[in-house]
Each structure stands twice: as C-alpha cells, then as structure tokens.
Image (cartoon, helix red, strand yellow):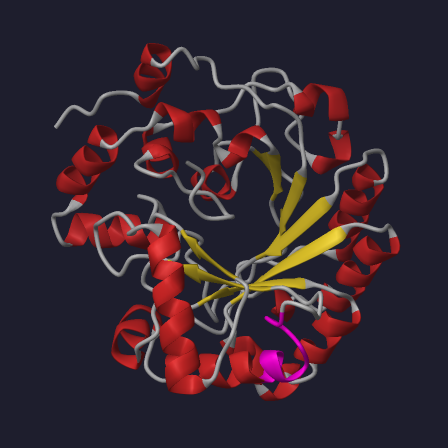
Amino acid sequence: MTLKPFDAALSESKLYPLTATGITVFQVNIGKLCNQACKHCHVEAGPGRKETMPKQIMQACLEALEKTDIPTVDITGGAPEMNPDFKWFVKEFRNRNRHVMVRSNLTILVEPDYKNLAEFFAENRVEVVASLPYYSEQTADRQRGAGVFKKSLEALKRLNGIGYGREDSGLVLNLVYNPAGAFLPPSQKSLEADFKRELLKRHGIIFNNLYTITNMPVGRFLNYLNASENYDGYMEKLISSYNPNAASQAMCRYTLSVAWDGSLYDCDFNQMLGMKVNHGAPSNIKEFDLNKLCNRRIATGIHCYGCTAGAGSSCGGAVA
C-alpha cells in the first residue's frame, strides 16, 4: 500500500516546510525503565529497560535551560520517577523558577519505594499528568495490565487527599486518555465530562483536565497494528482525517524533546524513531543553540498524521 507522504499534505495546506515557532516546552525523557509495560506504549518502556539519563546529561539540560526563558519543563519516561536522580532534577528546575510537569503512570506512586512521591510533588508544586485509559477497571486493565486500575485509584485518592485536583489548591492533576484500539479518540470535552462524572460518582475522585492523545503508529502500538493487520486501515483513517488547523498547532513547533542520552528531537515520537533534530540545528544538548533550535525545520514522517488527524493530538491533548 502506498501512503501519501506527510510533507505532501503539508504542502497542500501551505505549511511546508514545517518549522518551529519558538520553544515554550522543554521536554526531557529521563529513561525507559518502567514498572509497567503498556500495550500502547510508543516508548516500549518496561521493567527490563536499562536506558536511564545520567546526572551529567541532566546537568547539561540545566545549563542549557539557564540560557533561556523557556517557562515549562515536561519530565517523562518510562516511569521518570524511577531514575535515581529524579527528585534532585525536579528540585533543580524548580530552583530555576520553572514550571515542572511530570508524566506519571500513577501505579509507581503506590510502590513501596516511592510512596512519598505524592507529597514530594505537592511540596514542589509539580503539575501531575497521569495516564488513566478509562474509568472502568476492565478497559483500563486490558490496556495497561491486571491490577493497574485499582492501584491507579489508590494513587489518585492519595493525590486528592493532599489537594491535587482541587481548584483552589494550585496543585494541578490532569489525566490522559489513549484509545484502546485502532481508532481516533472521541471529543476531548465530552470525554472529560464523562470521566469527571463517573470517577466522582464511583470513587470520589476529582481532577482538573482530561487530555485525549491519539495512539501513534510507533513502538508497541505499531507492533499491534502490524500483528492485527490493522496498519493500513489505521493509517488510511489518520490520513483521511488530516486537519491543517491541527498541523499548524502541532506540539513539535513549540517543544524541544531531550532523550535520556542527551540527543535532541522535535518531539517524543521522533525520539522513539531515532529522527534527531536536523536541517542544520544542533542534535545534542551539549551543543544547545537557542536561536537555531527556535527557528529549526521540523523532521517529519508518515507517523506525523497521528498528531494532525481530527482534533489533533499533543502531549497536552487535542489542539484544534
């Protein structure tokens, strides 16, 4: 099957070449080690992964950030909390007066060695972005593993108990929804209303926002598409749903992604595909050049249809 190149879609919508509009989000993947091995994970993270960002690369990230006024740091993994220098890293960003987001799978917060993390997040005013595939146990466990839903509820209740999700607390708790199969997510606004109603009614849980994120044809989800013979149909769906408005607001245009080894990427998905920043911009954090990176041309591929289909998808949910 021949698929329409993504750059052709950009050209038709007068967005080629796609370029950065600046950097407002400094996203750092500090390792692929995780206590879970979710079926949709584009990082292919899991308990057996060894890739972990060393402290010297973390220091290089801090030195690069000091040269900028980038307001937001987005820490991800794997389970980023499992990096041995995680707490130090968060504190160093906060000491530099940056807003810190941490992408958590929730279950790590109830593991014996990590049970003080919720309080640590609150003390450092960390925004928690937590994965929860659905508000029913059966659907959530099918995607993320047996017993995950109950552990996630325990973590959410602990976060709520110290103020997370309450409008007047300043402690932000956002949830992330990924579809359980080869289809686009529903309306973010309507699904958020469903999650808020059902989680409150069934479990007394509250949160601030829900982000819907399209499953990208990368990593384990790509393996699933191929094994289930859904790849062609899914890609046709993404391509036919291409939205120029979503493309114009793609997260790669305002995000810089740093890998565990210091390599630079336009987004977390390019990172998993090994598509480094190119077209003349530096590709390693030790060669950080703000001007070149803020005006760089984005490296694109067929997977980019995932971020630009329908309402669009980003690490902050729908964009259009």
When the figure is inspected, residue 243 is found, relative to residue 12, above or below; the finding is below
Q: Is residue 211 above or below residue 71?
A: below
Residue in front for this viewpoint, 318 or 69: 318
Say whether residue 268 is left or right of residue 239. Answer: right
Residue 47 lies in the magenta-colored region: no
Question: 316 and 287: which one is in front?
Answer: 316
Residue 143: x, y in percent?
A: 30, 68
**Point 70% across, 19% down: residue:** 292
Can you see residue 37? no
What residue is drawn where x is 34% and y is 56%?
Answer: 190
Residue bounds of the magenta highlight: 158-166
- Where residue 13 sits: x, y (%)? 36, 14
Residue at (40% x, 26% y) in the render: 245
Residue 176 visible to the viewer: yes
Q: Where on the picture, by quarter, is residue 113?
A: bottom right
Q: Residue 132 lies in what quarter of the image?
A: bottom left
Q: Tell me: 200 left or right of 183.
A: right
Say which quadrant the N terminus sits in. top left
Estimate the x, y position of residue 126 in percent, counting from the top left. Answer: 70, 63
